[in-house]
Amino acid sequence: MATTTIEKGHTSFLQGIQGGASIAIGYLPVALTFGLLAKSTGLQLSETLLMSLLVYAGASQYISLSLIAAGTGVIEIIFTTFIVNIRHFLMSASLSEKVEEDALWKKAVYSFGLTDETFSVASMKEGTVSTAYLCGLMFISYASWGINSGIGFVLGASLPTTVQESMGIALYAMFIGLLIPSLKKHRKVLYLATLAAIVNSICYATQMISTGWSIVISTLISALVIEWIDTRLKNKEDLENG
């Protein structure tokens, strides 16, 4: 009985790795770019690897690089990355209804590997998702992100100094690249980005607060205002249709 359980777990783990192979491949260029940018920002190899292994959140890591480059304080960086990752509460709640019952410590272990991509793969899998499957899925994704971040840093270190310094502009190009696809799908994203940019510009021009807190405040204000307007419009449509 025990042998059968182990074999079943081993099979599920391998299926998880197979399911996460496409994620690992997709992470390769993004993680390499992160390593390159981390080098140009002034991080050491150990700091780059620790950020990828302990934070393990692509968008938050890129935002952190821009904040570090701007000389932002630690508290502002923590607040900003927390806001960016609030969606993980919803993803975790949704995935918890699909995974098998298991010890809390095991759930805590694989929950660390939850990303937009691993959530998508796990949630689309038919039936109940086993712990072994999730561990395989998240292991290969996590390994790809960490390893390729280090490789990107090493490659960046071999580039000429002038090229390393010019890599800073790639950070802004990356943010634009992440934003454009969302703008095409959801008009609300355009409103969010526009309002956040306006509020951040006002804070920057008046120099009332630091760059880090400016980003935090502009993000919160734009999210609350646009969501309030969107809710009011939906309620108005419901009343007209009902």
Image (tube, rainbow, N blue to C red):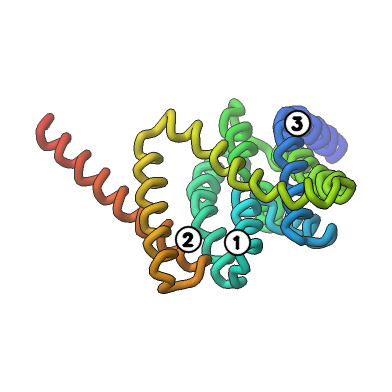
Q: Position of residue 221 (x, y in %)?
A: 35, 59
Hey, what amino acid is under mark 3?
A: Ile
**Residue holding disc 2:** 215
Q: Earlier in the sequence, mark 3 or mark 2?
A: 3
Q: Is residue 220 left or right of residue 17?
A: left
The residue that appears at 85% across and 46% down in the rendered structure is: 159
The residue pinned by badge 3 equals 25
Q: Amino acid at mark 2?
A: Ile
Where does the image place residue 78, in percent across and percent down from the top left?
58, 66
Residue placed under numbered mark 1 in the picture: 67
Name the residue nearer the viewer: 130 or 90. Answer: 90
Asked if the residues shown at circle 1 and circle 2 are in contact, with their CB atoms under 8 angstroms apart, the answer is yes
**Residue occupying image coordinates x 39% and y 69%:** 206
Which of pointers 1 and 2 lies earlier in the amino acid sequence? 1
Q: CA distance from mark 3 to mark 1?
A: 28 Å
- Residue 200, image quadrant: bottom left
Q: Badge 3: few (under 14), some or many (20 or more) residues near its Cα, within 10 Å?
A: some
Q: Residue at x 57, y 36 (%)?
A: 177
For mark 3, give the secondary structure: helix
Say which of marks 3 and 2 sits in front: 2
Instruction: Examine the rendering and report whether any part of residue 15 can be seen.
Output: no
